[in-house]
């Protein structure tokens, strides 16, 4: 009797194993199919190839700007790349938080309003408008014009920084090998850090205060005009 049961078990074992293998294969196949046919993954890269205003939100990890006149507003994005195709045009960032602004067009102008941005690469012109901007410069900036109370951190090079009347009580921190070659100011600004300021042209000597002593200071009624010869 036991021998008959053993023979019956062996006879049934192979078909059962075969059916289990088929069922497992179907689960794997249809499981993958269902995943593939589900909701598509959201593309986290946005390409801006025309002049328009975009509300960024929190949906993107990277934004690539290819056209002048683009305006990015109200959102958080890890990286913003400005392509050479922007040329001498302008890109505006309003209320944007970004860990990296990479400007591949040295001729472009970037206007920043109420944002927190870290700049990499070389930028010819940056304009800060309105209060509340946090700007960190890790690349090279040609001319930085500040027309609102802002906090600026420099760890590389700024050729010229202009602090207009509206930038009263702004702070500029220069650390490490950071250097600002020229500051022109009619506003009171506070310096921090151990970096270098090569020259200051100011309407009043008391406009500059803080931790960094400029290599050279010139008092001039209008710092933004060329000094008379």
Image: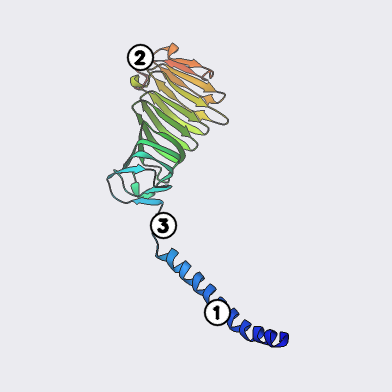
**Upstream in sequence: badge 2 or badge 1:** 1
Q: Which mark is residue 221?
A: 2
Residue at image location 37% in from the left, 50% down from the top = 46
Along the line of sight, the residue nearer the viewer: 17 or 143: 17
Q: What secondary structure is found at the residue carrying circle 3?
A: loop
- Residue at mark 3 to residue at mark 2: CA–CA distance: 59 Å
Q: Quadrant of residue 19?
A: bottom right
Q: Which residue is mark 3?
A: 41
Mark 1 is surrounded, within 10 Å at the Cα level, by few (under 14), some (14 to 19) or many (20 or more) other residues, namely few
Q: In the image, is residue 153 above or below residue 20? A: above
Along the line of sight, the residue nearer the viewer: 182 or 141: 141
Quarter placement of the C terminus: top left
**Upstream in sequence: badge 3 or badge 1:** 1
Name of the residue lying farthest toward the left:
52
Residue at image location 45% in from the left, 40% down from the top = 122
Q: Which residue is mark 1?
A: 19
Q: In the image, is residue 56 above or below residue 216? A: below
């Amino acid at each position: 009797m036991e021998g008959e049961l053993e023979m019956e078990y062996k006879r049934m074992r192979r078909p059962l194993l075969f059916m289990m293998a088929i069922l497992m294969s179907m689960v794997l196949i249809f499981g993958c199919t269902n995943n593939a046919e589900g909701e598509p993954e959201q593309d986290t890269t946005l390409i801006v190839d025309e002049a328009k205003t975009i509300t960024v939100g929190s949906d993107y990890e990277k934004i690539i700007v290819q056209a002048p006149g683009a305006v990015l507003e109200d959102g958080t994005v890890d990286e913003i790349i400005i392509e050479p195709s922007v040329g001498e045009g302008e890109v505006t960032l309003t209320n944007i938080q970004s860990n990296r602004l990479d400007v591949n067009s040295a001729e472009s102008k970037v206007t920043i309003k109420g944002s927190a941005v870290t700049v990499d690469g070389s930028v010819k012109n940056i304009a800060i408008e309105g209060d509340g901007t946090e700007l960190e410069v890790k690349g090279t900036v040609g001319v930085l014009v500040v027309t609102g109370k802002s906090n600026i951190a420099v760890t590389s090079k700024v050729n010229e920084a202009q602090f207009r009347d509206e930038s009263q009580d702004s702070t500029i921190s220069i650390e490490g090998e950071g250097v600002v070659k020229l500051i022109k100011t009619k506003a009171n600004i506070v310096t921090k850090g151990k970096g270098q300021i090569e020259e200051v042209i100011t309407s009043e000597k008391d406009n500059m205060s803080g931790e960094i002593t400029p290599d050279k200071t010139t008092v001039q009624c209008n710092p933004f005009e060329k000094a008379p010869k």
